[in-house]
Image (tube, rainbow, N blue to C red):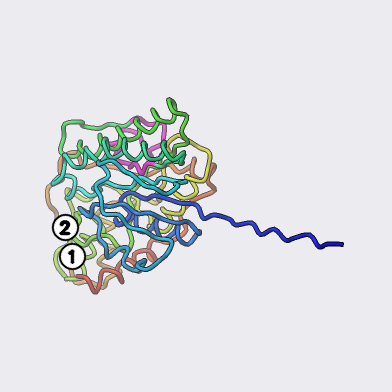
Amino acid sequence: MAKAKKVTRVVKAPVSVVTGGAGFLGSHLVDLLLSKGHKVIAIDNLVTGSVDNIAHLAGSNYFRFIQQDVTEFLFLDSPVDYVWHFASPASPVDYLELPIQTLKVGSLGTHKALGLAKEKGARFLIASTSETYGDPLVHPQTEEYWGNVNTIGPRGCYDEAKRFAEAMTMAYHRQHKMETRIVRIFNTYGPRMRLRDGRVVPAFISQALKNRPVTVFGEGQQTRSFCYCADLIEGIYRLMMSDYPLPVNIGNPHEMTMLDFARQIVKITGSKSRIIHKPLPQDDPKQRRPDITKAKQLLKWEPQVPFAEGMRRTIEYFKPRV
C-alpha cells in the first residue's frame, strides 16, 4: 500500500508597512514586528527620523526601507497585511518649526496611507495622540472626552492634524468598511529619542548630564504621565490585533508634576544641576493622565517597566550622545 505523501504547509509571513519607520516610536515598532515574524517595509522622509534608528537592520531579508514623503502617492508591488501610520513630527520644536508639513502629513499623508491600506485590503492603524484632548477640562482623560483645543494657537497644527487623521480614519472605516484602529499615545520616553527634539525627557536628561540648570516652565505644577517605549509599542501591537475600531488610550497613568520629574532626573543622574523656572508656553496642557480602563479590559494591557528602570535605560542611551 502506497504511503501518503506528507504535505508541508508554507506559512507566509505577514507584511507590515510602517510610515515614520525611522522615527523614535516607529523604529521600536519595526523591531517588535520583526521579532514577531513580520516582513516590514518602513517609509520615512527622514525630516525628523534617522537611519541610525534602523541601521542595525541592514542586511535583513525581512526589512526594507524606502525614503519617501508619505504625502506623495504610495506604490508598493508587494502584498500588505497591516499599515501602521506613524509618520509625523511629534515634538513641539518640530511641529512649531514645520507647521505646514505637520498638517500635510496628518491630512494628505493619512489619506495616502489609508488609500494604500484600502488597495491592499490591509488593516490600518493611526498613531494619534493625547494632544487631541488639548488642555483638558476632564481629568483623567477618557476616550469619550472630545477635548479642549485652540485651533489657531501655535500647537493647533499638531492637535488638529491628529484630530483630522482620526476623522479620516473613521470615514474610511464607515464608508469603505475597512478594518481600522486608532491609538491615542500619551507621553512616551526611551532610547532613540532625539537629544534636542524639545521634549521634556531628553531636555531634562541632557541638562542634568551636563550639570547645567534644568529648565522647568511655570511653577512646574503641570503634570505628565510617562510610559516606557517598549510598554507602549506592546500596547499598540495588541490594539492592531484586536477587533476594536474606536480610539484607545495607551500610556502610563502614573502622574507627576514637572517639578517632581526634574528632581527625579537630577537624583537618578547624580547631577549637580539646579532647577530654574521659565515662563509657561502658550496652550501648554496643565494636566495629562490617561484613563487606560479600555486598554486593560480590551487588550489586557498595562505598563510593566517601572519609572526608575525605564529612566536608567534611557539615561544610559543618552550618556555617550550628550
Mark 1 secondary-structure assignment? helix
Amino acid type at image mark 1: Gln
Marking on residue 207: 1
State the residue lying farthest toward the top.
175
Instruction: Name the magenta segment's main secondary structure.
Output: loop
Residue 94 location in percent, x, y? 18, 49
Residue at image location 14% in from the left, 67% down from the top:
212
- Asked whether 116 falls inside the magenta stretch, the response is no
- The segment highlighted magenta reads 126-146
Instruction: Determine whether, in the image, residue 280 is placed left or right of residue 17.
Output: left
Residue at image location 39% in from the left, 51% down from the top:
254
The disc, 1 or 2, on the residue closer to the chain's N-terminal end is 1
The quadrant of the picture occupied by the N terminus is bottom right
Residue 148 location in percent, x, y? 27, 31
Marking on residue 215: 2
Is residue 135 visible from the viewing direction of this image?
Answer: no
Q: Quadrant of residue 104?
A: top left
Residue 187 location in percent, x, y? 32, 50
Mark 2 secondary-structure assignment? strand
Amino acid type at image mark 2: Thr
Residue at image location 16% in from the left, 41% down from the top:
99
